[in-house]
Amino acid sequence: MTGQTSPPVPPEQPTFQRVLVVFNPKSGKGDSDLPEFVRLLRESGAEVEERELNRDTPLTEQVRDLADFDALVAAGGDGTVSSLAYATRDSGVPLLAFPAGTANLIAQNLDLPTTAEELATLFQAGHSITVDLGEIEVRGEKSGFAMLAGAGADAAMIKGSEDLKDQFGVMAYVLSAMKQLNPKKTTFTLTLDGEKREFVGIGVMVANFGMANYRMPITTDIDPADGQFTVVLLKAGNLLRLIPNLIDSVRAKLHLGDPLFSDNLETVHAREITVDAADAFPLQYDGELMVETTPFTARILPRAVRFITAATEEDVET
């Protein structure tokens, strides 16, 4: 893993003259550095328009005139960022994943700083990378995800964290994972680029980005710009048994030798995957729980979004 990348010094004139900020007022209990960030942008000479997400205005309507802006700031949690990335896919307009949620895994994967001043400096420097997006389809309804979608134990962990996030923040996910000591196992049927296979396990994760909190790699060989998903088959009896695999991933990132633990999960690659299960399992994408259950289909959208970051494409691989 790389350390925090220092953003380059921004030009005297802002790279992005017209900036659209779309924010979720409920993310992270509504407490973030966004007002200070916007103030700094305006002080730099940028024209900033702010729009608040609400139930009465479709998200696509919020970004209907995106072509009139030089950059988009998506301020909220991972669900807000991925939804806006999907709504503006293939536009070519660079997007900043402003971390205003609980975990902010997309921002962590992009190695973004967390203070308003650092974010404003990085933003106006204007460096970006172009990466893939995921599209998930359930019963004919399509949504987008930037990081990962999953069915089974990971979705159950997120569901279990919902009532804990206000009190414990990001630790809510850890506490919920510790409760998944005996998750339900079932037979999963996968269709990977047209080829079927089955396995018995506790879940399936379809990953585009591959780092968990503190930029810990979920597993090796996840590249958000390679035009395919890394599909993680969770064969372990519970989530805690995956800790050795996290150790292996860190060892691989640091080039410390071959994996020591390999039985708890398996990875395969695919551009499109359909996941079904003998028992209906809950679904999640980028931390957002879905009302629907399996089956679902995920497909890759190659090079569909430009994320603003000081990181390189190599920095965001696992």
Image (tube, rainbow, N blue to C red):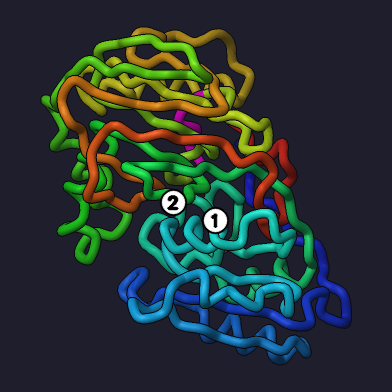
Q: Is residue 32 left or right of residue 48?
A: left
Quarter of the picture holding the C terminus: top right
Q: Residue at x 47, y 45 (%)?
A: 214
Evaluate whether residue 2 shows in this view. Answer: no
In the rendered structure, the answer to whether residue 238 lies left or right of residue 16 reads: left
Residue 145 located left or right of residue 138: right
Mark 1: which secondary structure? helix
| SS type, badge 2 | strand
Q: Position of residue 145 (x, y in %)?
A: 48, 48
Q: Which residue is mark 1?
A: 86
Q: Position of residue 268 (x, y in %)?
A: 50, 17
Residues under numbered marks 2 and 1 in contact, where contact means CB atoms less than 8 Å apart: yes
Is residue 164 part of the magenta span, yes or no?
no
Residue at image position (55%, 85%) is 50
Q: Residues within 10 Å of mark 2 (few under 14, many from 20)?
A: some
Residue bearing mark 2 = 143
Q: Nearer the viewer, residue 203 or 117?
A: 203
Please identify the quarter of the rendering in which residue 88 is found.
bottom right
Q: Amino acid at mark 2?
A: Ser
- Using the image as rendered, state which of residue 317 and residue 255 is in the foreground: 317
Using the image as rendered, state which of residue 277 and residue 209 is in the foreground: 277
Residue 113 drawn at (x, y percent): 59, 61
Residue type at mark 1 is: Tyr
Q: Is residue 201 visible?
A: yes
Comes first in the chain, label 2 or label 1? 1
**Which residue range is magenta in the image?**
215-219
Picture quarter containing residue 174?
Answer: top left
Asked whether residue 216 is drawn in magenta, I would say: yes
Expressed as whole percent of the image width and height from the top left, the position of residue 312 reads 74, 45
